[in-house]
Amino acid sequence: MSNDPLSIDCGGDCWGCVGEMEANMGHESSLEKVRQEFDLGLRPDWVEPKRPA
């Protein structure tokens, strides 16, 4: 088991990838969590997805 907090097993895929993909697609609960992780410095390269106009 890794000490990486983004490698939590979420049923077959790691949260590090799945969370960001879901957030970028607008899934609200994932977006909230990824924003928190960004604020904590866990996702320094993450960019807030743009809302459609």
Image (tube, helix red, strand yellow):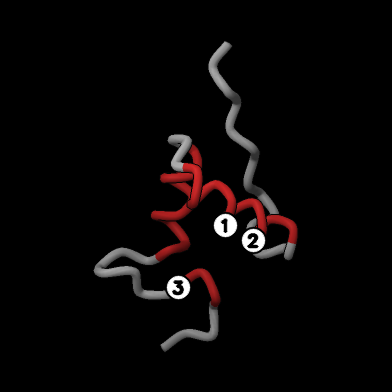
In primary-sequence order, the first of circles 3 and 1 is: 3
- Residue at label 2? 37
| Residue drawn at the location 73% of the way across and 63% of the way down | 41
Q: Which mark is residue 42?
A: none
Q: Secondary structure at mark 3?
A: helix
Q: Secondary structure at mark 1?
A: helix
Quick check: marks 1 and 2 in contact, CB under 8 Å? yes
Tell which tag, 3 or 1, sits nearer the viewer: 1
Cα–Cα span, label 3 and label 2: 13 Å
Q: Percent from the top left, x then y, of residue 23? A: 49, 44
Residue furthest to the top: 53
State the quadrant of the C terminus: top right
- Residue at label 1? 33
Q: Residues within 10 Å of mark 1 (few under 14, many from 20)?
A: some
Cα–Cα span, label 1 and label 2: 6 Å
Q: Percent from the top left, x then y, of residue 16? A: 47, 62
Tell which tag, 3 or 2, sits nearer the viewer: 2
- Residue at label 3? 7
